[in-house]
Image (cartoon, rainbow, N blue to C red):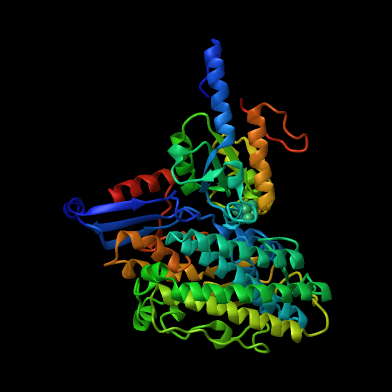
């Protein structure tokens, strides 16, 4: 991650504004690197009226070049590996990755299948892991909120393991 | 396509990561102005190797593995598998278990169709309908969670029966849910049939004649919307369908609008069927004993998934693991219809046309190994990649 040089008061203030903006409106992109669809549906469900993540300012949108957060599901297949890395590289800094589902955490039920490389963390750095097969929409939202809290500099909920990169 | 031709055409590539669908797939549309003159699809990004994977897991583990072929129709995969294995082992599953299996697969059909309604409306730019249908879909998700404990992979089936039972409380909850959904579905049907803008996007778009549907071997609601009477629940009833017959939902129009209507009517039919099952739920055991080793043999088990006919070929060599399982999924059969129906439509209609067959990638990405002149060739990943780059150049 590129280091922001926090020297002058002006730069410090600017950095604070950036973090504030980032926390209040993270744009997410979703990529399926070989999941069974279950996790993807639950991610989509978080956008719909009952869960409605847009109230946190989170917006799911299409292009990796506009995104701050990569929400990634599924074990990584050989075919998807290069695409996943490419999408990750296309995202502007700073970027965060949320791995959703048991598959993304460890390969899940597909461990040992010949076309599966393994977990998402084997391919790109992951910040938040959301376990479950599939995780409930509440759990996904909780994962996102953990990420946002860690950006604010709050220590994450001890029960949750959100790894802050900052 | 020769190189010369390729330069003269304008090709719009879409995917594998794209905002429209939630799964990776790569499409190439050849366009002339706004009109699509050719389409090609490239799948395979989510190929995981399940068919091979099941050979190294035992019969019970495979239920869970096969449920995860697809997150939308997970129960029906497990049903096809368990029905096949029970047939091989020659056990008869108690009627109550069969009824519960059927009930859950109808609930799954409702959830799948409502999900599809939302996604298809979203592709057409009708996000209000998307939000409404997904809000109502939560009703059936809640019901599935109440009876099975999970929202997506219910794991209702075990070999020789089911592991969940229904009590009065759950039955009342299901009935209430069905009443609510029935009312909502009537509302959606009204919207689909009367909303001017919506009709403009769907009526007469992507029309497929019944002959075409037959030739391209379309299955499920896609075929039924073109007037092909093909429904395994009626043609070859399994589980509890012989006792609880369903009505065939047909439409002869064959366009996108017909697919909406057929799917919504199937939802209505599912509500009726679920109520009937609840009224006449057989009493008795939930499971029978299954042997750990399945006798040698082969079988084909066919069921009607929300997207169409799903067939499992199961071969046992007498051990505690299957020898071979081949899965034929409905989405792959329907993909073929896209490439021929797409031609002549506007590029803007493509997302809706794609959504019209209710595509699902996770179940249809597979690998084929070609035996050339009986000389099996093994390619390393790198070779394959280079070959692919050359091929698509
Ligand atoms: S964690 Fe479960 S639901 Fe999610 S992709 Fe994997 S198998 Fe599917």
Is the residue A139 above or below the residue B269 in the image? above
Q: Position of residue A131 (x, y in %)?
A: 69, 46
Q: Quadrant of residue B110?
A: bottom right
Direction from residue B354 to residue A101 in the image, left or right: right
Q: Report the number of discs.
A: 0
Of residues B186 and B343, the one nearer the viewer is B186
- Asked whether residue B368 is in view, the answer is no
Seen in the picture, residue B24 relative to B386 is either above or below; the reply is: below
Image region (quadrant) for ligand 1: bottom right
Q: Position of residue A8 (x, y in %)?
A: 54, 10
Q: Residue at x 52, y 59 (%)?
A: B362
Q: Position of residue B267 (x, y in %)?
A: 58, 76
Camera-nearest residue between A164 and B365: A164
Side of B199 relative to A12 (left or right): left
| Residue B305 picture location, percent across and down | 56, 73
- Quick one: which residue is furthest to the top in this view? A8
Identify whether B9 is placed above or below A124. Answer: below
Front position in the image: B25 or B371: B25
In the rendered view of the protein, which quadrant contains the N terminus of chain B?
bottom left
**Based on the displayed image, in which of its 4 quarters is residue B226 positioned?**
bottom left
**Viewer can see residue B203:** yes
Q: Is residue A125 left or right of residue B377?
A: right
* Front-lying residue, A157 or B55: A157
At x 42%, y 68%, the residue is B198
Q: Is residue A4 above or below residue B246?
A: above
């Amino acid at each position: 991650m590129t280091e922001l040089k926090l020297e002058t008061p002006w730069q410090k203030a600017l950095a604070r504004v950036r973090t504030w903006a980032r926390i209040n409106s993270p744009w997410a992109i979703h990529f399926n690197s070989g999941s069974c669809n279950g996790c993807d549906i639950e991610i989509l469900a978080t956008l719909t009226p009952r869960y409605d993540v847009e109230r946190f300012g989170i917006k799911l949108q299409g292009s990796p070049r506009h995104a701050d957060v990569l929400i990634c599901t599924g074990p990584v297949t050989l075919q998807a590996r290069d695409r996943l890395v490419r999408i990750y590289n296309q995202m502007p800094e700073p970027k965060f990755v949320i791995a959703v589902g048991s598959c993304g955490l460890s390969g899940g039920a597909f461990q040992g299948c010949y076309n599966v490389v393994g977990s998402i963390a084997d391919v790109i750095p992951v910040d938040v892991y959301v376990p479950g097969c599939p995780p409930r929409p509440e759990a996904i939202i909780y994962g996102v909120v953990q990420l946002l809290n860690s950006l604010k500099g709050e220590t994450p909920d001890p029960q949750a393991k959100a790894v802050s990169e900052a | 396509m020769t190189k010369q031709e390729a330069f003269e055409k304008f090709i719009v590539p879409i995917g594998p990561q794209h905002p429209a669908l939630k799964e990776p797939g790569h499409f190439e549309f050849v366009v002339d102005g706004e009109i699509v003159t050719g389409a090609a699809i490239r799948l395979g990004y989510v190929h995981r190797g399940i068919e091979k994977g099941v050979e190294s897991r035992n019969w019970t583990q495979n239920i869970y593995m096969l449920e995860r072929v697809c997150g939308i129709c997970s129960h029906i995969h497990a049903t096809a598998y368990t029905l096949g294995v029970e047939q091989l082992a020659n056990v008869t599953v108690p009627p109550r278990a069969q009824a519960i299996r059927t009930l859950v697969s109808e609930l799954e059909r409702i959830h799948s169709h409502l999900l599809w309604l939302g996604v298809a409306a979203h592709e057409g730019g009708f996000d209000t309908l998307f939000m409404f249908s997904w809000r109502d879909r939560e009703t059936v998700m809640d019901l599935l969670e109440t009876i099975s404990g999970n929202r997506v992979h219910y794991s209702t089936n075990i070999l020789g029966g089911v592991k969940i039972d229904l009590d009065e409380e759950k039955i009342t909850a299901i009935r209430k849910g069905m009443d609510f959904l029935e009312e909502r579905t009537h509302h959606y049907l009204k919207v689909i049939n009367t909303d001017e803008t919506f009709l403009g996007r769907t009526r007469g778009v992507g029309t497929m004649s019944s002959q075409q549907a037959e030739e391209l071997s379309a299955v499920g609601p896609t075929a039924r919307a073109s007037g092909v009477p093909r429904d395994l629940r009626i043609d070859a009833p399994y589980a509890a369908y012989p006792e609880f017959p369903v009505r065939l939902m047909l439409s002869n129009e064959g366009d996108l609008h017909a697919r909406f209507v057929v799917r919504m009517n199937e939802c209505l039919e599912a509500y009726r069927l679920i109520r009937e099952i609840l009224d006449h739920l057989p009493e008795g055991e939930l499971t029978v004993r299954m042997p750990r080793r399945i006798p040698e043999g082969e079988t084909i088990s066919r069921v009607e998934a929300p997207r169409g006919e799903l067939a499992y070929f199961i071969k046992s060599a007498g051990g505690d693991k299957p020898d071979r399982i081949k899965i034929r999924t409905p989405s792959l059969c329907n993909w073929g219809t896209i490439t021929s129906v797409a031609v002549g439509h506007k590029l803007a209609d493509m997302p809706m046309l794609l959504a019209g067959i209710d595509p699902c990638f996770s179940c249809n990405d597979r690998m084929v190994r070609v035996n050339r002149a009986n000389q099996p060739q093994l390619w390393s990943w790198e070779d394959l990649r280079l070959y692919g780059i050359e091929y698509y150049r």
